Amino acid sequence: MKWVVHYAELGLKGRNRPRFEKTLCENLVRALAPLGRAVARRLYGRILLDAPEDANPQDVAERLGRVFGVAYFSVATTLEPTREAIGAAVDAFVSTRTFASFGVRVRRVDKALPFRSNQLAGELGARIQARTGARVDLSDPELWVDLHLLHGGEAILLHERRSGPGGLPVRSSGRALALVSGGIDSPVAAWLLAKRGCELSYVHFHSAPYTSAASQRKVRDALARLAAWTGPAKLWLVPFAELQQTLVREAPSEPRIVLYRRFMIRIAEALAERVGALALVTGDSVGQVSSQTLANLDTINRAATLPVLRPLVGSDKGEIIQLAKRIGTYEISIEPDEDCCSFLMPRQPATWTRPGPIEAIEQGLPVKMLVEATLSRVEQERIEPIS
Ligand code: ATP
Ligand code: MG
């Protein structure tokens, strides 16, 4: 079965456009690979996709609906670009549907073909009306009949149009490293950056064996859901308990969470360098919890040299939850677990730290050594999409 994929923003990329289109083609083929071999080719501002033979159209549609960069897509029937062939195909198509209103749209890419788009649309409209008695509605009909006349003697009839997720193809915007907890927010933040074309690697800090393995399992499961949108990815698991215990011994208790976070940033940056990631991604949202007041975000951020991208910074929890449900991570994220920051949590976390005093505390600590000791015990896994 053939499909036509339309992209939106890619059209704006000027001379970069062929590269974006190529990446999108590769991602489409990869998204369908579990169903068999697909072939994608660029075609005048759209992509013509030969789905794997015998693949269930519903499965294909589901997968195409998760490829970033896709604005919308349709099933395509290819035709001879003659009036007779087009008329016959349209007859066959409308005879399989019931509808009270319809619209015909013709786009003629090949201006050499002996049709005028409007004229052909009018002829086909009259023909469908005569056959079915349905009324023409060009604003919101029950059935669209979309006909594209392409170069090289090809015409396609498009139907079953569906929306894609929009955005840019993954791998078209460089790599970022996302910090993921077992919570609701961080997978959503990662998804939003993937939607902007970033290829993501992930890092999770855990306090095993002092906390259960639940957070690690949740992170793996949530990332497998994300991988259904992005393809496979790399996850680093960082054993954080020892460093936390050092901080508990050596530093005052109130700013402990901020200190944990600053160490997370430093360790994440070292891992980012290993994979050439140019930014970190977190699920912070201003004011949501004590570590996310503007003052604490400022103090935490000063430990970073890479940009820390926080796509949820202005989102409410309700909005984040809605998105998590759409992505497929919500059900996993709400399972109970123990976050590494609940391990050795201070009784009264500081809500308003300033960089000066925190840096003074860190000056009394072997920061570099603590970071390196933790990095030496990092484990790496590969995340595969859940099918
Ligand atoms: P989330 O729902 O993403 O856990 P949260 O609302 O619980 O977020 P915090 O616990 O303050 O907020 O975490 C803020 C951000 O810091 C997270 O979104 C995530 O990017 C990062 N983070 C927190 N804990 C961890 C962890 N254990 N491993 C990796 N990153 C973490
Ligand atoms: Mg959390």
Image (cartoon, rainbow, N blue to C red):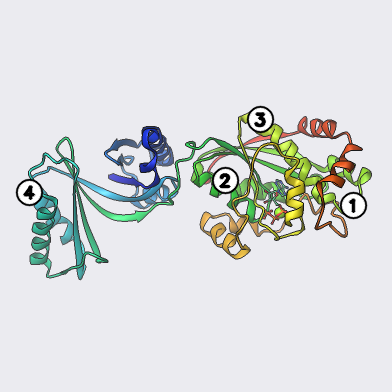
Marks 4, 3: nearer the viewer: 3
Amino acid, disc 4: Arg
- What residue did someone put label 1 on? 253
**Which quadrant of the figure has residue 119?**
bottom left
Q: CA distance from mark 2 to mark 4?
A: 49 Å
Other-residue count near label 4 (Cα within 10 Å), few / some / many at <14 / 14–19 / ≥20:
some
The N terminus: image quadrant: top left
Residue lying at 30% horizontally and 51% vertically, measured from the top left: 74
Amino acid, disc 3: Glu
Q: Are marks 3 and 2 in contact (CB under 8 Å)?
A: no
N-term-proximal mark, 4 vs 3: 4
Amino acid, disc 1: Ser
- What residue did someone put label 2 on? 224
- What residue did someone put label 3 on? 273
Q: Disc 3, ligand 1: is the CB inside 8 Å?
A: no
- What residue did someone put label 4 on? 83
Q: CA distance from mark 4 to mark 3?
A: 59 Å
Depth order, front residue of 19/217: 19
Depth order, front residue of 276/333: 276
Q: CA distance from mark 3 to mark 2?
A: 24 Å
Marks 1, 4: nearer the viewer: 1
N-term-proximal mark, 2 vs 4: 4
